[in-house]
Image: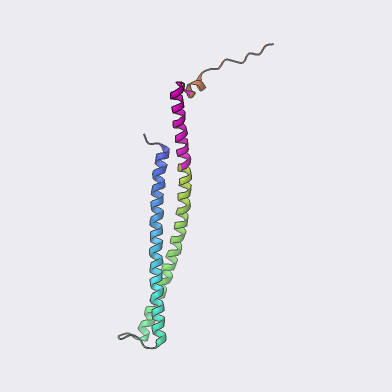
Amino acid sequence: MTSRADKLGRMVSLVKLQLRLSEWQLAHLRQQERSLQDEQEWLVGTLNEGKPPAGSSSESIARRLTRTSVGARVVQAQASQQLDQVRAESRRVKQFEQVAKAALADKLRDAEKRSLEEMTGTSLTVREWTPRPANRTKT
């Protein structure tokens, strides 16, 4: 029989894996963003020099710069969304960890309680259900 604490522990592991995947995706988007920015800088420098590389014209470089700029904005927007997702998943991991920690503490308390009951030979639940004598008051 699987306890609630064990199930929550597995859920925490899964949510942490999701967080790691989201962080990796964010790092990948940031890398793409840097690459596009580097390309933009190179294209602007090429246009400013006035001497386009062999086989290229100023117009083709300008079109490429426009495409690169649009791509950079798209990647920036995706990275922003991904950062929001990473933050949300990070909060979710913390919440799951707290719930799992509480469930584990409950599981350990129950195990301690059973252990004490076994050592003393009594069951606390049996004592709770045993009728108690009525309080008799002298009148």
Q: Quadrant of the C terminus?
A: top right
> Which color scheme does this rendered protein use?
rainbow
In magenta stretch: residue 22 = no
Give the residue at the far top of this rendering: 139
In magenta stretch: residue 104 = yes
Give the residue at the far left of this rendering: 55
Above or below residue 122? Residue 36 is below
Q: Nearer the viewer, residue 16 or 111?
A: 111
Left or right of 135: which side holds 6? Answer: left
What residue sits 38% from the left and 48% below the top? 14
Q: Picture coordinates of residue 17 (x, y %)?
A: 38, 52
Q: Picture coordinates of residue 79 (x, y %)?
A: 43, 64
What residue sits 38% from the left and 83% below the top? 46
What residue sits 46% from the left and 24% below the top? 117
Q: Picture coordinates of residue 40 (x, y %)?
A: 40, 77
Give the residue at the far front of this rendering: 119
Picture quadrant where residue 47 is located: bottom left
Q: Picture coordinates of residue 102 (x, y %)?
A: 48, 40
Give the main secondary structure, helix, strand or loop, of the magenta stretch. Answer: helix
Give the residue at the far bottom of this rendering: 50
Picture quadrant where residue 5 is located: top left
Above or below residue 107? Residue 33 is below
Segment tinted magenta in the rendering:
101-123
Q: Nearer the viewer, residue 22 or 62?
A: 22
Q: Nearer the viewer, residue 56 or 127?
A: 127
Q: How many labels sit on residues?
A: 0
Q: Quadrant of the N terminus?
A: top left
What residue sits 37% from the left and 85% below the top? 59
